[in-house]
Image (tube, rainbow, N blue to C red):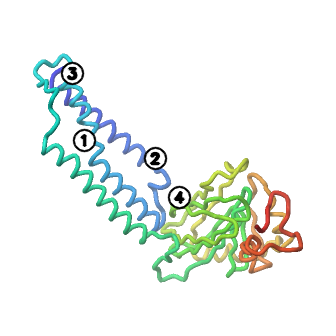
Amino acid sequence: MSRNQLIGILLAVGLAVFLTGLIVVAGSPAVLNPKGILASQQRDLLVIATLLMLIVVIPVFVMTFVFAWRYRAGNRRAAYTPDWDHHRLAEIIWWAVPGIIIAGLAILTWQSSHRLDPFRPLDAAAKPLTVQVIALQWKWLFVYPEQDIASVNLARFPVDTPINFEITADAPMNSFWIPQLGGQIYAMAGMHTQLHLEASETGAYRGVSANLSGRGFSGMDFTAEATTTADFYQWVRSAKQSTNRLDANSYRELSRPTQDHPRLTYVLADDRLYEKIIMRYLAPQTDGSHNRPGHRGGR
């Protein structure tokens, strides 16, 4: 095989890698097709970190082909030096370059970890909207304490408005994730976590459970809809006309394990529902109301 043939093979391999990457991007995986401010920054961080690591990865693959060809058994022109064990320039390159990349990744990770902290409120002129998220088996309950409504498997909010998600669980540990809007955050019983997101475009985005939680896990999806402000408040007014009331009895029924639960809207009858669910695990009740099927109460 001639040198030109070898170069042709390397170019073909490089082109195949490039086209594969292009196809992946064109396919618009959720994390590479952000629709929110936080998700865009996370996508950029992912791309930058990948490109930095490719500085090492690509030369390694190229040298693998080059060395395999140059030092093949049939190449009599290659120098045979079995006692060779040191080359100052080579050692400087393969220690210094990865070291610089690791240092760069460390700085990048440190800065982005603070900038993209899920507990850090977003800077925006619009008033934030609070949405309380409760992970159940196997569905999501969204409570809007300021609007006195709640919904199952549907989170709706205005575009260009910071959303303060307050997250807990009344079921086994789970993970709340809207890939096109931002990273995931865990939902755990007796604990309160936060996630601040903001949608930059109107649309319906897939929300998922990112933590295996049993038999109904595969159907534990929800829809996150970013709408205009007018459409959001129209939905709020419509939800307030619902015949479903979310009180202690209806919540007890709703919290029973179900699979592929349909979307529902409720009028919120107890604006402290979220806090009471958390406290159930911190201060066990004595009336036995928390000991329902499929649920374990306080510790």
* Residue for badge 3: 72
Q: Could you tell me the amino acid type at mark 3?
A: Arg
The residue singled out by tag 1 in the image is: 59
Q: Which mark is residue 179?
A: 4
- State how far apart marks 1 and 4 are (Cα): 32 Å
Mark 1 vs mark 4: in front: 1
Q: CA distance from mark 3 to mark 4?
A: 47 Å
Between 272 and 180, the one lying in front of the other is 272
Of marks 2 and 3, the one in the foreground: 3
Q: Earlier in the sequence, mark 2 or mark 1?
A: 2
The amino acid type, in three-letter code, at marker 4 is Pro
Q: Which residue is mark 2?
A: 27
Nearer the observer, 86 or 215: 86
- In this view, the residue in front, 70 or 283, is 283
Relative to 271, does residue 80 appear above or below in the rendering? above
Q: Amino acid at mark 1?
A: Pro
Q: Secondary structure at mark 2?
A: loop
The x, y position of residue 155, in whole percent, is 64, 66
Mark 1 Cα shell of 10 Å, populated few (<14), some (14-19), many (≥20): few
- 280 horizontally vs 221: left or right: right
- Disc 2 packing (10 Å; few <14; some 14–19; many ≥20): few
